[in-house]
Amino acid sequence: MNHAPRPHHARFAHAALPKTILSGPPRMLELLASPMSTPFLMDIWETVGKEVGKGDRMPPDGLHVAIRKSGEVKITIVTMPAPACAGEAHFVGFVATPETRKMLFLKSPATVRCFTLDRAEGGATELSERGKDGAALSTAPGPGPDLESFARALST
């Protein structure tokens, strides 16, 4: 039984996708939430596959995008191929909050945050916020490993 995360899976969810969306222009998140999301994801997936080498490449089975809204907040969720061990992601989610005005001259800028829901030991999950480099900024016990539970966790 494999106890180490598969390089292709882990690098895509924890590094390549967060870096692409968080470090790129705002259009990157729009592209991920558009009808072009599948070719966009496949391009990133294939690039990571070339980086990890032939022996560590894996098919993108189950990789797809879902969009949820919570008020003005837009949540873009990438479903990953099924995780095989602890440390692999079930989902990668991006939470986009629009610019808001508190007073005439005071405003909060628009933000995009990235989260992963990773498989943990014993069937549990771990919710992590990811930085532009993919590093975990914070980690907490996560919700159930289903899309709607993850979406609810990101909307709070």
Image: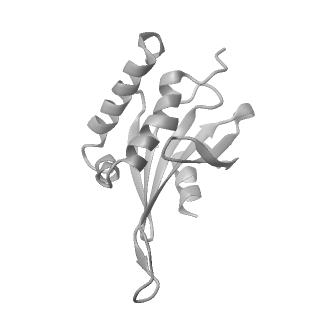
| Residue 76 image position (x, y, % from top left) | 42, 52
Residue in the picture at 29% in, 53% down:
27
Q: How is the image coloured?
A: one colour
Q: Residue furthest bottom?
A: 104
Q: Is residue 120 left or right of residue 50?
A: right
From the viewer's perspective, is 45 left or right of 137?
Answer: left
Q: Position of residue 146 (x, y in %)?
A: 56, 44
Number of numbered discs overlaid on the protein picture: 0
Q: Quadrant of the N terminus?
A: top right
Of the 4 image quadrants, the one containing the C terminus is bottom right
Q: Residue furthest top?
A: 55
User: Could one spot residue 59 in this view of the protein?
Assistant: no
* Rendered residue at 50%/41% (across/down): 133
Residue appearing at x 40%, y 68% in the figure: 98
146 over 41 or under it: above or below: below
Horizontally, is 74 left or right of 124 in the view?
left
Task: Name the residue nearer the viewer: 124 or 44.
Answer: 44
**Nearer to the camera, 90 or 134:** 134
Q: Residue furthest right?
A: 122
Residue located 42% across and 49% down the image: 22
Rendered view: 20 above or below 76: above
Does residue 31 appear to the left or right of 105 in the view shown? Answer: left
Q: Is residue 99 visible?
A: yes
- Residue 32's place in the image compared with 57, above or below, is below
Q: Residue 99 lies in what quarter of the image?
A: bottom left
Q: Where does the image place residue 100, in percent across and percent down from the top left?
A: 42, 76
- Residue 67 in the image, given as x and y percentages of width and height: 39, 54
